Image (tube, coloured by chain):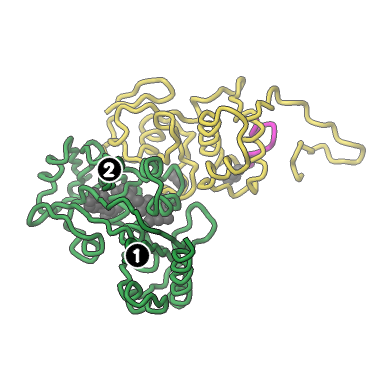
Chain colours: A green, B yellow
């Protein structure tokens, strides 16, 4: 049975995490707990964050700050922007009362489905991730965090400048509370600068820089390599992805 | 660790990463929350944690230390059903009954939150993550809406069969 470490402050969480060796970060546990209970995952030490004080949500200023253990339910209650639109589609209300934002950002694909839907809107919003681990604390763009050594990091918080431009999104999933994403597209344009985030099509969310430069939806396939899973084939995703990018860009224009 | 379950305090000895579902069923022998999928996908394990519906199979016991839990056992008795239970009974919203504990608990939370008649959309939103493999959902949704309108009291007499009709007729039943 795993040893449970239950820090009561962010500092204690960071020090217990150390360089992340032999420690499994436990956010809400909606992904981890079933794995542990079924005996498929045997953490030696579980860093349980529920008392760590990392659940603050600050939307009062020009920068939106989201603590890593903010639940998706609290996020939906406290925000109303591009990120909210995606959070509303993760599982159902009962799952969202346990699931955290940090866990969503660090989620790896499940059996037959992709996870980590919030990556797309966070990329489009130009979010920055504050994390700790080897080499100490650092803050970096979410796309760098995702493509870097995220398994060895403890996410402390996520922040983004309150969007003052136009945003749009397109989501494709089956009409069911528990159906995972097939394609997620989030776009944000601030002062003529476009940012495009894609999630649900592969192991992690990706920033579609080619589309940002050319504004040609077909270019999305230069940045993203869709996968096949139980919900959709790679081929289907390759056909749908440019279409949904086009719709999102059209939506921006008519906004 | 401690839990207050249906108003009664319990000391918990299961390890911190035990799902609340297993603590309820195995340590406390409170068996209305069913162990269905055990991965968050079916909703039959749903209980109220400090009044809010959550999946007990996704909830590690350490994260709810000290919380107040309500299960189906805390809602009504066989002789005095809660309004949602009475509506499920009267309107035939349960068949095998495996999904029923989660359905009733989540519906009770919805009715508490709204505090008056709920719409079909409200029910679909609240129960959207709950699977039922028997009823086809229509009777469940109708029952929750009826309960929210206060339309269920005593379980009414069953209609007596017409001549030539088999006497298994149950109101609302296809049989
Ligand atoms: C029925 C159901 C439907 C679902 N639908 C969706 C969906 O539509 N879209 C979707 O994206 N997900 C979905 N999920 C998966 C999951 O619930 C969410 O991704 C959730 O946000 C994960 O958060 P968590 O806190 O529960 O993660 P956990 O299980 O706690 O952790 C997940 C991973 O992240 C790591 N982690 C957690 N917190 C941190 C942190 N602060 N720093 C570093 N690493 C951390 C953990 O070590 C683990 O590897 C669904 C789950 C269920 C059960
Ligand atoms: S047993 Fe918990 S959701 Fe299925
Ligand atoms: S009554 Fe059988 S699963 Fe719902």
Let me know if residue B57 appears in the view: no
**As drawn, B86 above or below A19:** above
Nearest the viewer among A67 and A165 is: A165
Instruction: Specify whether tag 1 is near ligand 1 (CB below 8 Å).
Output: no
- Relative horizontal placement of residue B69, taking residue A16 as reference (left or right): right
Judging by the rendered image, the residue that carries numbered circle 1 is: A197
Chain letter for mark 2, please: A
Mark 2, secondary structure of its residue: loop
Q: What residue does disc 2 label?
A: A61
Q: Is residue A172 left or right of residue A123?
A: right
Mark 1 element type: strand
Q: Please, which residue is most extreme toward the right here?
A: B163
Q: Residue B23, percent across and down?
A: 36, 35
Q: Is residue B112 above or below residue A43?
A: above
Q: Nearer the viewer, residue B162 or A92?
A: A92
Position in image of residue A161 (x %, y %): 28, 52
Vertical relation: A9 (above or below) A32: above
Residue A255 locus on image (x, y percent): 47, 60
Magenta region: B87-95
Q: Looking at the image, which is closer to me, A214 or A124?
A: A214
Q: Chain of mark 1?
A: A
Q: Residue at x 33, y 61 (%)?
A: A190
Q: Is mark 2 within 8 Å of ligand 1?
A: no
Measured in 3D between alpha carbons, the distance from the residue under mark 1 to the one under mark 2, in whole angstroms, is 24 Å
Q: Is residue A244 visible?
A: yes
Residue at 32% over, 53% down: A104
């Amino acid at each position: 049975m795993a040893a449970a470490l239950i820090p009561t402050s962010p500092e204690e969480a960071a020090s217990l995490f150390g360089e992340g060796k032999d420690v499994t970060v436990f956010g809400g546990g909606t992904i981890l707990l079933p794995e542990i209970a079924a005996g498929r995952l045997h953490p030696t030490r579980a860093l349980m964050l529920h008392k760590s004080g990392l659940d603050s949500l600050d939307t009062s200023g020009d920068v939106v700050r989201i603590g890593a253990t903010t639940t998706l339910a609290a996020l939906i209650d406290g925000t109303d922007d591009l990120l909210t639109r995606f959070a509303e589609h993760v599982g159902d209300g009962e799952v969202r009362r346990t699931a955290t934002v940090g866990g969503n950002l660090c989620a790896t694909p499940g059996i037959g489905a992709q996870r980590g839907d919030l990556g797309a809107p966070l990329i489009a919003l130009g979010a920055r991730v504050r994390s700790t681990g080897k080499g100490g604390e650092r803050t970096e763009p979410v796309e760098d965090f995702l493509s870097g050594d995220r398994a060895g990091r403890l996410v402390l918080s996520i922040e983004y400048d309150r969007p003052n431009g136009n945003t749009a999104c397109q989501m494709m999933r089956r009409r069911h509370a528990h159906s995972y994403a097939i394609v997620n597209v989030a776009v944000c344009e601030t002062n003529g600068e476009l940012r495009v985030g894609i999630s649900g099509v592969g192991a992690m969310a990706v920033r579609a820089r080619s589309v940002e430069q050319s504004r040609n939806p077909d270019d999305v396939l230069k940045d993203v390599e869709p996968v096949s899973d139980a919900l959709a084939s790679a081929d289907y995703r390759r056909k749908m992805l440019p279409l949904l990018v086009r719709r999102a860009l059209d939506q921006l224009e008519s906004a | 660790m401690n839990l207050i379950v249906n108003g009664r305090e319990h000391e918990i000895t299961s390890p911190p990463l035990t799902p609340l579902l297993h603590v309820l069923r195995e340590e406390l022998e409170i068996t209305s929350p069913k162990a269905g999928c055990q991965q968050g996908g079916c909703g039959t394990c749903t209980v109220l944690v400090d009044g809010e519906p959550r999946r007990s199979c996704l909830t590690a016991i350490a994260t709810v230390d000290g919380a107040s839990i309500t299960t189906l056992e805390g809602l009504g008795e066989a002789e005095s059903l809660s309004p949602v239970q009475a509506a499920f009974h009267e309107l035939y919203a349960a068949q095998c009954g495996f999904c029923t504990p989660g359905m009733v608990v989540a519906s009770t939370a919805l009715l508490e939150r709204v505090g008056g008649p709920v719409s079909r959309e409200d029910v679909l939103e609240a129960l959207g993550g709950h699977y039922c493999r028997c009823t086809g959902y229509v009777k469940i949704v109708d029952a929750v809406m009826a309960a929210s309108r206060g339309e269920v009291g005593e379980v009414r007499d069953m209609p007596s069969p017409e001549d030539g009709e088999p006497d298994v007729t149950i109101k609302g039943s296809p049989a």
